[in-house]
Amino acid sequence: NIHHQCSIRHIDLSADGEVVIAMQYQGHLADDVPLVAHHRRGEAIRTLPLPEYVRSQLKQYCGSCCFDQSGRYAAVSAPRGNQVMFWDMREQQFLGTVRLKDACGLAATTVAGLFAISTGRGKTYRCSVRHGQLVTDVLSRSPFLWDNHLTRL
């Protein structure tokens, strides 16, 4: 069983009690193991759909995850794979990825479907999930190298 080499890196809880889970795997890079899952009390943990062409680029590491303000959308960052992935949790549907170098920190904003993203290279972005489309723009650049997690204040 290769799953003993999986560990949870981060979790987030939606307002209605759903959990999204970002994981890492410390085995061989070619092993096909789940890296993103979700859970609801009283149910089994289930993996989220993730195309193999995306999973294979993640270098077996997801760093952070969060739900948007509405709880409908979830984001999971993979800084070693230089991307952030998005799901429609109501439909259990993978929406796509945004490619950003060393992106890891994620936070919900006060707007449904809008996420803040930070990178270890000093940039912050916002990404909106609109009608299944991902729209990203740069919020700021700074000399600070951001850590793996963001919190909305």
Image (tube, rainbow, N blue to C red):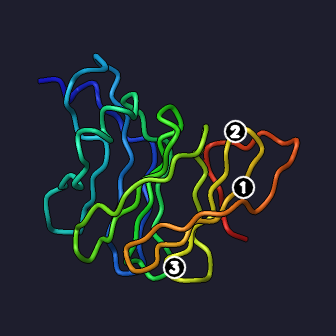
Residue 69 image label: 3
Residue 124 image label: 1
Q: Classify 10 Å Cα crowding around label 2: few (below 14), some (14-19), many (20 and above).
A: some
Residue 120 image label: 2
SS category of the residue bearing label 2: loop
At label 1, the amino acid type is: Thr
Identify which residue is drawn at 25% across, 21% down.
30
Residue 43 placement: quadrant: bottom left
Quarter of the rendering occupied by the C terminus: bottom right
At label 3, the amino acid type is: Gln
**Residue 15 on image: x %, y %:** 42, 79
**Residue 3 on image: x %, y %:** 20, 30
Looking at the image, is mark 2 or mark 3 earlier in the sequence? 3
Looking at the image, is mark 3 or mark 1 earlier in the sequence? 3
Kindly give the residue lying farthest to the right in the view shown.
143
Q: Classify 10 Å Cα crowding around label 3: few (below 14), some (14-19), many (20 and above).
A: some
Residue 28 image label: none
- Horizontal side, residue 2 vs residue 86: left or right: left
- Horizontal side, residue 118 vs residue 10: left or right: right
Identify which residue is drawn at 32% across, 71% down.
88
114 w.r.t. 54: above or below: below
